[in-house]
Image (cartoon, grey):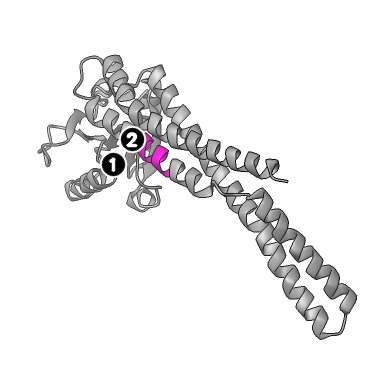
Amino acid sequence: MPNVLSIGCDPESLEDRHLLLREAGASVTSVLGYSELKRLRLPLYSDVVLIGDEWQICEVERLVRWAHTNAPKATVVVLQKNGTTHICEKCHYADADDPQDWLPPVKVPPTEFTDHMEDLENWANTNNKEAIADLIQYWVLKLSAIVVAVSSTVFAVFKLDNLAMIAGTVAAACVLIDGFVSGGTLRYVHRRAYNEISTLHANMEAKWRAGSLHCEDAEQFAAEIIETSKAEQNRIRSYLAAAESALSDRRADLQRKP
């Protein structure tokens, strides 16, 4: 199912194209006018950018430049009537009255590839959540100790000795527990993993978009992308496992000490 960004300036024509593209099995985002187009979230990951035939030639040139800048991997399709002059060799030109000609051949990634990409995205998000949790765990006792220690000083200034002693004891307990637990020590490891997995995901997606229009066997091409990514995935898994193992060993040593 190709992802299509349909751009038009006439509401009725835009709606008609939207329905026809949906009937053809495409996933469609329709945008009315250039001002609405500029509000789209970038970068775009559309397979096809479809420019309606109701635009003036100067406006079509502007939209083509926009599409090549913001959706560089997409195929730009310009709808025409009566054989309008081609303005860009990189575009695909189609008859506005023939919906069968609107969508150039776009290979849809195999289910195995999309599942693999979804697994990578979930893996990256898991590491991001763990990095945030580690950051909170790292600072919660430290900030508590700082706040209570400052409070102890304030109590002492106002001759509230009992409260000052209690606050000092709590601050010392926070420091002691923080030193024993060593919470949040993997925050940088998880953040690094999140960044590298996200980069790997983006690179694999870019390879598919760049090569899928030229390959003959989509399943074989997708399998090659997955296969070439295994070394990077194994490297990330290796340092994550090593970091977690080192942390477990450290905690075990602390527990064995008298």
* Percent coordinates x, y for residue 57 in the rendering: 17, 46
Name the side, left or right, on which 104 lies relative to 139.
left
In reply to whether residue 198 is colored magenta, the answer given is yes
Q: Quadrant of the N terminus?
A: top left
Q: Nearer the viewer, residue 208 or 51?
A: 208
- The answer to whether residue 15 of the structure is visible from this angle is no
Residue 248: quarter of image = top right
Q: Nearer the viewer, residue 175 or 41?
A: 175
Q: Nearer the viewer, residue 76 or 73?
A: 73
Give the alpha-carbon distance from disc 1 to disc 2, as whole Å.
Answer: 7 Å
The residue under the point 37% across, 25% down is: 26
Name the side, left or right, on which 75 lies relative to 181.
left
Amino acid type, mark 2 = Ser
The residue under the point 73% across, 59% down is: 174
In reply to whether residue 33 is colored magenta, the answer given is no
Residue 237 numbered tag = none
Task: Say which element carries label 2.
Answer: loop
Residue identified by numbered label 1:
71
The relative height of residue 220 versus residue 4 in the rendered view (above or below) is: above
Crowdedness near tag 1: few (<14), some (14–19) or many (≥20) residues, C-alpha within 10 Å: many
Q: Which residues are magenta?
A: 195-201
Q: Are marks 1 and 2 in contact (CB under 8 Å)?
A: yes
Q: Main secondary structure of the magenta part?
A: helix
The residue under the point 10% across, 37% down is: 89
Q: Earlier in the sequence, mark 1 or mark 2?
A: 2
Residue identified by numbered label 2:
46
**Residue farthest toward the front in the current orientation of the protein:** 258
* Percent coordinates x, y for residue 29 in the rendering: 40, 36
* Percent coordinates x, y for residue 189 in the rendering: 48, 45
Amino acid type, mark 1 = Ala
The relative height of residue 122 versus residue 42 in the rendered view (above or below) is: above
The residue under the point 33% across, 35% down is: 46
